[in-house]
Image (tube, helix red, strand yellow):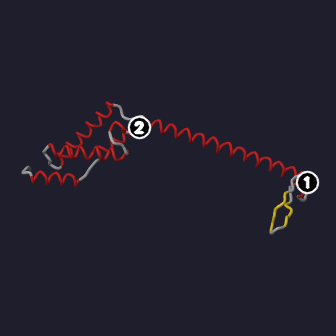
Amino acid sequence: MSKNVDYLAVGGSRERIHGFDDLPGGTAENEIALAMQKSVAQLGGYLTQMGQIMLQMQNRLDELEEKQRLVTLSHDEVKAVQILIRNRSMEYCEKYELKDEGSRRAISGAIKKAVLKRYGVKDLHDVPAIARQAVESQISRWADIRLAMKCREKNRAAGGT
């Protein structure tokens, strides 16, 4: 019996699966089939190696992302973000004609709250440094018409403009 013959259990019996040595034709066809079998086995090995390399790369990327997430905004960057928040709240108050300091503070607080909520942190110092540009963009695009109307109503109730 040749070494390239396997058996398959089918319905309680063992049926013979023909190996490459049992193929009809000459030895040239058998050699080609054996060469193909070796090539397929070699390609399988390469795929396994590539899979392991990709897994290692993914693990390394995960580690780098975690390290990058742990790097947070510096003190100066936090001050710059606070200034951006203050400026945006003043622009927003101008747009909706809210002249009192309480409205500006409420809007500043809402902007800050939106930034903190987006990054799941409790303080601006905990925002990832890599997200600084996204934070700036979020602040510049922030809008909450309901809050503006609520502030306007409080102004009117208090006897303001």
Q: What residue is disc 1 on? A: 2
| Residues at circles 2 and 1 in contact by the CB criterion of under 8 Å | no
Q: What residue is disc 2 on? A: 130
- On screen, residue 32 versus residue 83, left or right, reads right
**Three-letter amino acid code at disc 2?**
Ile
Tell me what residue is drawn at x 28 percent, y 43 percent.
Answer: 112
* Residue 9 horizontal/vertical position (percent): 81, 64
Q: Residues within 10 Å of mark 1 (few under 14, many from 20)?
A: few
In the rendered structure, which disc, 2 or 1, sits on the residue that comes first in sequence?
1
Q: Residue furthest bottom?
A: 11
Q: Residues within 10 Å of mark 2 (few under 14, many from 20)?
A: some
Q: Which mark is residue 36?
A: none
Tell me what residue is drawn at x 32 percent, y 38 percent.
Answer: 124
Q: Secondary structure at mark 1?
A: loop
* Residue 69 horizontal/vertical position (percent): 44, 38
Q: Residue furthest left?
A: 159
Tell me what residue is drawn at x 90 percent, y 59 percent.
Answer: 24
Q: Secondary structure at mark 2?
A: helix
- Dividing the picture into quadrants, the one containing residue 18 is bottom right
* Residue 123 horizontal/vertical position (percent): 32, 39
Quote the CA–CA distance across marks 2 and 1. 63 Å
